[in-house]
Structure formats: C-alpha cells, structure tokens
Image (cartoon, helix red, strand yellow):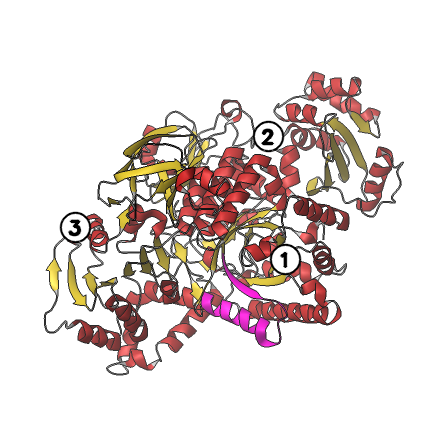
C-alpha cells in the first residue's frame, strides 16, 4: 500500500520555513487562541508562547508589541478545523486553515501572510494554472553532490482537476528492470502509471535547497538549465517559455 | 548477546518499520541497515486497514524478512494515533462515519492533527466499531495460527503488543498543559453517552453502593457526581478494552507472547492540537517547550491491568511536529523520553528514518544509555503516588505541589497494582475525585499499617462500607486524630496506624505548599540536590553506588548555575561509569578522577543539553538535602521569551 500522501517527502521538497531559514526573513504573524478573553494556546515561529497562556487578550495586545499577531476565538478555530477535516490530505487541510487565519474578520490586515508558499507551488497555483493542463504530474529528482553517499531524493506530484491529488516518492517497482533505463523512460512510465502527462526535472540537491529559500528563484532556475546543471525531462519549449516569462516578467 | 535477550525482551529504543508502505527491496535494505547498526529488534504497527487489504501479503513477507535476519519483532495491534496511515489505519468506512466519532461536549470531535491527514478519532465505545475491531483481532490470531502451522520458525522471535489505543486522546483541545483544569477527558459523543448511562446503571447496582438502603445508590448518579463518574467510566472503559483485546488474542492458543504498553504520542496530544494546526498553517517549527512539558506529564503516569504494570512508552513520529525541530531539540527530547520511560522499564519508539537522521555519535551515546537503563542499574523511583480515577484526566488536590517538588518521582496511577510494583514509595495520596470503595480502602490501610503514609481526602466520595472500615481501623470515633493547621485551608487530621500514618485533607484547600512540604518531610522523602536556576530540570536515577543525576537544559541558551548538596559529595561524569566500568552503572572508587568532595559545584549546561553526573555515596550514607518550599519553580525564573 503505497502512500498517496507522503508528508515527509513533501516537506523535504516543498517546505520553506521549517528548516534553516532565518526567522526574520520569513516569520509570519504569531497566532493565539482565546477562550472567554484569555489566551489558551498559541503558536509563534521561533518563539515559545507558553508564557502567554492565561494572559488576557487585552494584556496580550499591550505586551506582545514586538511582533505582529492575531488572536482567534477557540470556537472559530474549532469550526475551521472541522472544515479542514473534509479535505483529502494535510497539505490541503493546512491551506484551508491558512486561508481562514489570513482573512481577519475585524478588518485589520496582516502585513505578512501566515506562511509563504514554496516557489514551485506558487508558480503552479498562480497564473500558470490557466495554461497548464488540468491533469498532470511532476517528477523531481534531486541529485546528491559527487562524493556524497545515498540515493537521490525523488518526489512525484499528481494534479487532477487543478487540485494536488497526491504527493509521494515514485513507486518504480513495476518498471522493467534494465540497466539502461533513462530519465525519459522513467517519466514515460510514470505518465502511463498515473494516466496523466508527466514533466520531469533533475536538479542538483544544493541548487534546490538554495532556490527553496527564495520567493522568486526563477532566474536561477533558468541559469541552471542553461548551464545544464539542471534539466527538464522531456525538454519542452512551452515550459521553458513559461519559466522565462516568470523569471523576467514576473508572470 | 542479542539485545532481545539482553534486555529481557524489552529494548528501550524500539525502531519502527512501516512495512505496509515499503517496496520489498526497500524493506530488505532497511532491515539490513538496522542489522548492520547492531539492532536485533524491530517493531511495527499493524494498521487495521492495511491488514484487511493486504492482497500482496506484505505482513507475511515482512515477518519472513525479519526472521531470515534473526531479528526479533514486536507487532502493535491496537489502533493508535502514531500509525503513519490514513485515519490512523482504521478502515475508511468506519473512520468516515460521523456517527461513531468521539466527541467532547464543548469542542466537537476529538481530532488528531498528524500527517497524512488530520482526522477525527472514532469512538471506542461504538458497538459497530468494536465488533469490527474484535473481528480484526480474531483474523489476526487466525493469521498467526496459520503461520504457526506452516512456518513456525517465523514466529520464533515475535511478540504482540496491546496499547491503550485512542482513549487518552479523548480530551478537550488546548489548555496548553496536560494538567490544565479545562483539559477534562472522556468521550461524550453518542456512543460514549450511551455507554456512560449503561455504566452508571451497572456500577451503582452493586451492593456496596446500596448501603444503607437501595435509595442510597441514587445519590451516586446525581448531576453533582457527573465529573467524578465520567472519570471512573473513562478508566473503566479503557481497562475493559485492554482486557477484552487480551481475551480475544488468548482465546485460542496465541503462539507468541503478549505485552501491554502505555504508548503515548506527545505530538498527537489534544493539549497540543491548537499549536499543531497553527504550526502546520504557518509552515513552521513545532513548539519544543510544549512537547517537552508533555513528556513530563506523561512520565508521571503509570497504569496496570490485572496486576501487570503497562510499560510506559513514548513515540516520536516522523510525520508530526517532532521532525520539524532542530537536531539538538530532537536529541534533547529523545534523551529526556529515554531517561523518563526506560528507567521505568519502558521504551521510546522511533521510525528508522528518524533514527538515521540523528548523528552517528548521538545514536551511539543514546544506544549506550539505553543499554544501561535496560539493565535496571539506574532506576527512577516513585516517592509519592497519587491514586486517581482516570489516568489521563487532570489530577486534583495537592498534585501540582507534589509534581513541582518531586518532578518525575511523583507519580499518578489508576490502579493499586502500580503501588505493589513500587516498594520504595513512602507516600500515597488518594485523589479528591476518586470514589473509595471497601476493597481498595482495605488495601491502602494495610499498606499504611506496614509503615507508609496514606493521605485521604475528606468528603463524600467514600462508600459506607469503606467509611466504616476506615473509621474502625483508625479509631476515628475514639478521637485518636490529631489536627494540624496549614496555610490556605490545607489543614490535616492525622491518625497513627500500625507503623504508618493516615492523614485526611480538605480537598477545597487553595494553598498546598506547606501541606506538601510537611508531609514529604514527615515521610522521610529527601531530594539530593537543589539547582540555583529554575529553568534547569533534574532527573535523578538511583544506582547501587549512588545516584545518576541528569541535569536538563531545555532552553535555547546555555545556563550557568550552582548545584547544592546537603553534605559533601563526590561528583563525576556519569559518562565514565556508563562506558568504562566492568560493572556498568557502578562507579568504582579507582575510576573516579581526583575531584575534591564538596557541597556546591558550579555547572554550565549547554542549550538543549543534558549533563550526566554521578553523585557518589560517601561511606554508606548518601548525601541528601531536605525538600524545602523554597525550591525554585520550574517556571519561576523563565519570564523572558526564549
């Protein structure tokens, strides 16, 4: 039973903030949960919110001035969690909650989003979604630097009807075992297995990690493609055009 | 020697293999890697759904692969929140049925916010759910019996485990800490409520409650006792679940040993739910401090089923907040869990991928410590035990004060069988929410008579027969009691009983400090050291020659402090005794570096650091300091945000 939703693999590839990024660069607002005017829980990236438990929301507003924050009522959060339970997987569930947390009913706008999207997801879910097919797959392989042991990391994303349907390491156990199988064969195999057109990309691990820390690394992506450090499998001019438009015109 | 044999079958670090999500090649590679690293034992959940839809015989192949490598294996059969599968491995049709979801009255379904999907927990009170679950256990037993007939060698090193399943996660979310008063426990959904009514009817139809007349039984069912009854009901339901699981597995011949685990997953705790979902939304790191405190709360809980203590276990998942923490934070939590549970015969569960993410040197150190703990030479005792009606509900009365003064040496238990396992216990406290019946009252009085200090709440939660028994044995009517006043209403009435004492306390008291301190001193409970900085925590393990003292810094900065002892002691690096001694855990005098005995030592503990010290007995007497009410509070000096 292969997992359709492999959260670990997803995080290894598509998380911006979880590891290693300096707090100041990407910290979203602190989030607190209140019941009857007192804080009962909270979360603040890089900070411990424990000491604020039991504080009145008024006092919190006065004393927690060093960082933007939002206080939500427990009943609202519980309602949003129940809403999120209807989603298929943790990525959609977190996104559902994120949207709720970002829309402040009091009219106060948060100056920063609750979380930043990974650049790849940002691209796929933005303007590109109008030109990309509604069903497709993406295969990413991160090559380790020379001399570093271990198999390359792989991720397989399947989008159907514009929604992220699954994310996991590709299961290649059904693929014919030959020493000469190339990346093209692998992408073709995945297309046949999941019945959607697949686009593959083979990228050096270090490049990917550097790009993942940035909101708009598209120029670096193009440079890596030009320098043949990274490659698209198969190479599609249309996709290269989209990358170029994003890198130079922000589209 | 194999770890399995060396640890009497119970390795303290248990590596989990998720066989159902691995391709055969990958599975073999992972087992080989573990074997190369010296492991001779692995564990795995058996997700219910995966077992029922196992058309490619993955479990069988897993058992064969494990057997071929001569590894021992324990399979956890109960559905649990730490299973990396949709709906914790529960069949989809059951998990999707809102009718059978567990609920809390004010907060809706009981939710677990772990990957791959946040989900509502099913109610283990649901007859439909349980009928299917018992059928699953029977099928599993059939599977083992078939294997026993056809390939008995595969079962040679196999054991199965039963856990407390979802019960402890039926609690209100939020509240920050485990013992928050708002964090009440129990399933109040449709099935839970129906079972509760049935329980009330059965429980109070017993003769003991109809004393002095049948109308007296009605008193116990009134609204004012609802919270108390729900706690008793929650514990009774969980115990019944464990017993019935065991009965089904033992109904026919079970060809492998069975053990009971008290498995706890801090990342799935309802007290952490709000933080977990907000963290997922913010795409950030987990709250390390909160998780660390949940380990503390879990470490104070201990239960038993039919005279067998359930092994305390902590699981850190590879798909929750734990894996977002920094290396040093993960190492700290692992060491802390290991010290707190393995020193009580328990274990820490970790997936193989998470284990390999740790540095090689850390893995080596943790493994060494685990071996020493498993040998039982470093033990965490229980000086004070508070008997509660439900293990996973917040405890009342003076509990917070015991916990503050004695840390993990104060214990909560839901069964008196735990008391039998702790001959070192000097003080037993009955929780104000416990309904004291005649038989437990007799056991407790016998225990006190043999030289212990028993602390009972005054109030109505005593059956008439228990009350009569207590009154007669203590000579209450003869006025043998002695009243001792205390601050905040915490006065007590004390009676001598044989070699021991029985104290009565007022559960309505507000200030327990003097009360707790005086009882601890009277009972002869001593703490060996005091730290100058309340942000540091100590775990003190007894060894034959003295004490293994672990000073834990769970903050993000290095802390310098003094450690004070009542008498001059010799202190050395515990790591020495763990590695070099021919008698591991025991420091030989010639091994000790020439450090002058002293009463005060200065220490610097790095951020997320654990400083292991060996405190050596001077002659036969071990240096101790009396507990005082001025001990720094764990939170006391931790005012600035980290």
- Separation of residues labelled 2 and 3 (CA atoms): 52 Å
* Helix, strand or loop under label 1: strand
Position of A217 relative to B112 (above/below): above
Q: Which residue is mark 2?
A: A16
Residue name at image x 30 percent, y 49 percent: B620
Q: Which residue is mark 3?
A: B488
Q: Is residue B341 visible?
A: yes
Q: Is residue A137 part of the magenta span, yes or no?
A: no
Residues packed near mark 2 inside 10 Å, few (<14), some (14 to 19) or many (20 plus): many
- Separation of residues labelled 1 and 2 (CA atoms): 38 Å
Q: Nearer the viewer, residue B51 or B522?
A: B522
Evaluate whether label 1 is on the same chain as label 3. Answer: yes
Residues packed near mark 1 inside 10 Å, few (<14), some (14 to 19) or many (20 plus): many
Q: Which residue is mark 1?
A: B73
Position of A163 relative to B204 (above/below): above
In the picture, the quarter occupied by the C terminus of chain B is: top left
Relative image position of residue B401 (x, y in whole percent): 27, 49
Specify start and end residues of the magenta stretch as a single range. Answer: B238-262
Contact between marks 1 and 3 (CB within 8 A): the answer is: no
Q: Earlier in the sequence, mark 1 or mark 3?
A: 1
Q: Nearer the viewer, mark 1 or mark 3?
A: 1
Q: Is residue B258 part of the magenta span, yes or no?
A: yes
Position of B247 relative to B522 (above/below): below
């Amino acid at each position: 039973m292969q997992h359709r939703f492999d959260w670990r693999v997803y995080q290894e590839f598509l998380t911006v903030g979880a590891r290693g990024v300096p707090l100041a660069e990407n910290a979203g607002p602190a989030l607190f949960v209140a019941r009857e005017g007192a804080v009962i829980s909270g979360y603040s990236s890089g900070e411990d919110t424990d000491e604020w438990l039991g504080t009145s929301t008024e006092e919190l507003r006065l004393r927690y001035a060093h960082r933007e924050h939002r206080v939500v009522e427990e009943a609202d959060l519980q309602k949003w969690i129940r809403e999120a339970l209807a989603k298929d997987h943790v990525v959609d569930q977190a996104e559902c909650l994120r949207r709720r947390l970002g829309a402040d009913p009091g009219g106060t706008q948060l100056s920063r989003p609750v979380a930043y999207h990974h650049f790849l997801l940002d691209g796929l879910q933005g303007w590109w979604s109008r030109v990309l097919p509604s069903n497709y797959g993406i295969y990413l392989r991160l090559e380790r630097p020379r001399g570093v042991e271990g198999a390359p990391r792989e991720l397989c994303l399947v989008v159907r009807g514009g929604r992220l349907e699954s994310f996991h390491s590709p299961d290649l156990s059904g693929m014919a075992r030959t020493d000469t199988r190339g990346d093209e064969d692998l992408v073709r195999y995945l297309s046949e297995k999941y019945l959607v057109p697949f686009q593959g990309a083979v990228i050096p691990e270090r490049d990917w990690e550097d790009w993942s820390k940035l909101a708009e690394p598209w120029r670096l992506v193009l440079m890596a493609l030009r320098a043949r450090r990274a490659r698209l499998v198969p190479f599609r001019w249309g996709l290269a055009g989209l990358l170029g438009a994003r890198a130079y015109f922000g589209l | 020697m194999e770890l399995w044999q060396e640890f009497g079958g119970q390795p303290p670090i248990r590596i989990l293999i998720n066989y159902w999500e691995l391709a055969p090649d990958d599975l073999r590679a992972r087992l080989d890697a573990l074997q190369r690293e010296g492991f001779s034992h692995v564990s795995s959940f058996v997700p219910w759904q995966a077992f029922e839809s196992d058309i490619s015989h993955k479990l069988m192949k897993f058992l064969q692969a494990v057997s071929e490598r001569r590894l021992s294996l324990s399979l956890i059969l109960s559905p649990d929140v730490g299973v990396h599968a949709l709906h914790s491995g529960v069949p989809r049709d059951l998990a999707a049925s809102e009718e059978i979801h567990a609920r809390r009255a004010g907060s809706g379904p009981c939710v677990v916010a772990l990957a791959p999907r946040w989900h509502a927990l099913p109610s283990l009170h649901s007859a439909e759910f349980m009928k299917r679950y018992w059928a699953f256990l029977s099928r599993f037993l059939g599977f083992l019996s078939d294997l026993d007939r056809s390939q008995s060698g595969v079962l040679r090193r196999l054991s199965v485990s039963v856990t407390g399943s979802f019960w402890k996660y039926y609690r209100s979310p939020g509240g920050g800490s485990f013992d928050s008063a708002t964090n009440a426990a129990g399933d109040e959904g449709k099935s839970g409520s129906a079972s509760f009514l049935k329980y009330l009817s059965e429980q109070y139809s017993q003769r003991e409650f109809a004393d002095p007349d049948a109308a007296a039984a009605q008193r116990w069912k009134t609204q004012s006792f609802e919270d108390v009854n729900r706690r008793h009901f929650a514990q009774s339901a969980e115990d019944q679940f464990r017993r019935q699981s065991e009965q089904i597995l033992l109904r026919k011949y079970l060809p492998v040993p069975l053990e009971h685990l008290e498995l706890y997953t801090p990342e799935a705790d309802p007290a952490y739910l709000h933080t977990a979902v907000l963290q997922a939304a913010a795409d950030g790191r987990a709250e390390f401090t909160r998780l660390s405190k949940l380990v503390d709360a879990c470490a104070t809980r201990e239960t038993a089923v039919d005279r067998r203590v359930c092994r305390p276990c902590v699981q850190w998942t590879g798909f929750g907040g734990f894996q977002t923490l920094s290396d040093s934070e993960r190492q700290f939590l692992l060491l802390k869990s290991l010290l707190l549970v393995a020193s009580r015969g328990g274990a820490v569960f970790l997936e193989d991928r998470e284990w390999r993410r740790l540095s090689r040197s850390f893995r080596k150190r943790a493994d060494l410590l685990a071996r020493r703990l498993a040998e039982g030479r470093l033990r965490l005792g229980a000086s004070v035990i508070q008997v509660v009606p439900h293990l996973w509900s917040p405890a009342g009365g003076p509990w917070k004060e015991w916990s503050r003064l004695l840390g993990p040496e104060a214990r909560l238990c839901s069964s008196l069988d735990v008391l039998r396992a702790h001959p070192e216990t000097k003080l037993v406290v009955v929780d104000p929410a416990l309904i004291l019946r005649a038989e437990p009252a007799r056991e407790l009085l016998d225990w006190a008579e043999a030289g212990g200090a028993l602390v009972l709440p005054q109030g109505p939660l005593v059956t008439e027969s228990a009350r009569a028994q207590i009154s007669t044995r203590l000579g209450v009517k003869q006025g043998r009691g002695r009243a001792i006043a205390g601050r905040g209403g915490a006065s007590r009435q004390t009676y001598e009983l044989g070699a021991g004492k029985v104290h009565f306390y007022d559960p309505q008291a507000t200030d327990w400090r003097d009360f707790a301190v005086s009882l601890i001193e009277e009972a002869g409970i001593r703490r060996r050291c005091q730290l100058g900085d309340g942000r540091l925590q100590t775990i003190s393990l007894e060894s034959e020659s003295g004490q293994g003292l672990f000073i834990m810094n769970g903050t993000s900065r290095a802390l310098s402090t003094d450690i004070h002892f009542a008498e001059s002691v010799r202190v050395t690096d515990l790591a020495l005794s763990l590695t070099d001694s021919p008698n591991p855990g025991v420091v030989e005098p010639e091994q000790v570096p020439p450090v002058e005995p002293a009463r005060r030592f200065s220490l610097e503990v790095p951020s997320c650091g654990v400083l292991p010290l060996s405190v050596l007995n001077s002659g036969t007497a071990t240096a101790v300091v009396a507990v005082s009410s001025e001990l720094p509070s764990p939170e006391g000096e931790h005012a600035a945000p980290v």
